[in-house]
Amino acid sequence: MDGNEYESRGLRVLDFTMESGEWVLLLEGDGGENQALTVVGEAVEAVGTGVELSPGSEEEMIVRVDCPSTGRIQRTIRLPPLRSPRPPR
C-alpha cells in the first residue's frame, strides 16, 4: 500500500432495502470467514444458506453470515419479518 489506501476488513452493509416484504441487505465481507452483524428492530427470520440468527439484547438480532471464497466478496441476504405477533411486554 502506498499510504493513500487501506485494507478494508470486516463486514460492511452496502445497501439495506425492503423488497416484496423482506429486508434485503447487500453486504461486503472477507471471504473464507463467518462474520456477524447486529440488526435492531422488528424480529426477522433467516433465509438461505450460510445465514444464521441468534437473539441479542432487547430488540436486537445477531446475524451471522458465511462469506465463501477469498478476498473481499459481496453477498446479498434476505431477512423477512416474522409473521407471528410478538407477545406484549
Image (spheres, helix red, strand yellow):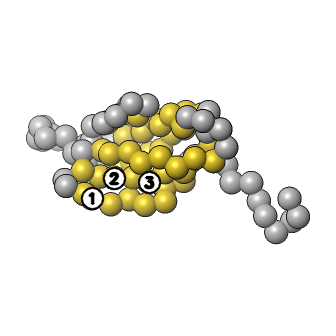
Disc 3 marks which amino acid?
Answer: Leu
Seen from this angle, which residue lies furthest bottom?
4
Name the residue: 47% across, 37% down. 65
Circle 3 — which element? Answer: strand
- Would you call the spot at circle 2 few (<14 residues within 10 Å), some (14-19), or many (20 or more)? some
Instruction: Mark 2 and mark 3 in contact? Answer it, CB < 8 Å.
Output: yes
Q: Position of residue 30 (x, y in %)?
A: 62, 42
- Would you call the spot at circle 1 few (<14 residues within 10 Å), some (14-19), or many (20 or more)? few
Name the residue: 67% across, 49% down. 9
Q: CA distance from mark 3 to mark 1?
A: 12 Å
Q: Which residue is mark 1?
A: 18
Instruction: Mark 1 and mark 2 in contact? Answer it, CB < 8 Å.
Output: yes
- Would you call the spot at circle 3 few (<14 residues within 10 Å), some (14-19), or many (20 or more)? some
Circle 1 — which element? Answer: strand
> Can see residue 12?
yes
Name the residue: 25% across, 57% down. 19
Is tag 3's residue or tag 1's residue first in the polypeptide sequence?
Answer: 1
Q: Which residue is mark 2?
A: 24
Q: Which residue is mark 3?
A: 26
Seen from this angle, which residue lies furthest front?
69
Q: Quadrant of the C terminus?
A: top left
Disc 2 marks which amino acid?
Answer: Val
Relative to 8, 68 lies left or right? left
Name the residue: 32% across, 45% down. 78
Is tag 1's residue or tag 2's residue first in the polypeptide sequence?
Answer: 1
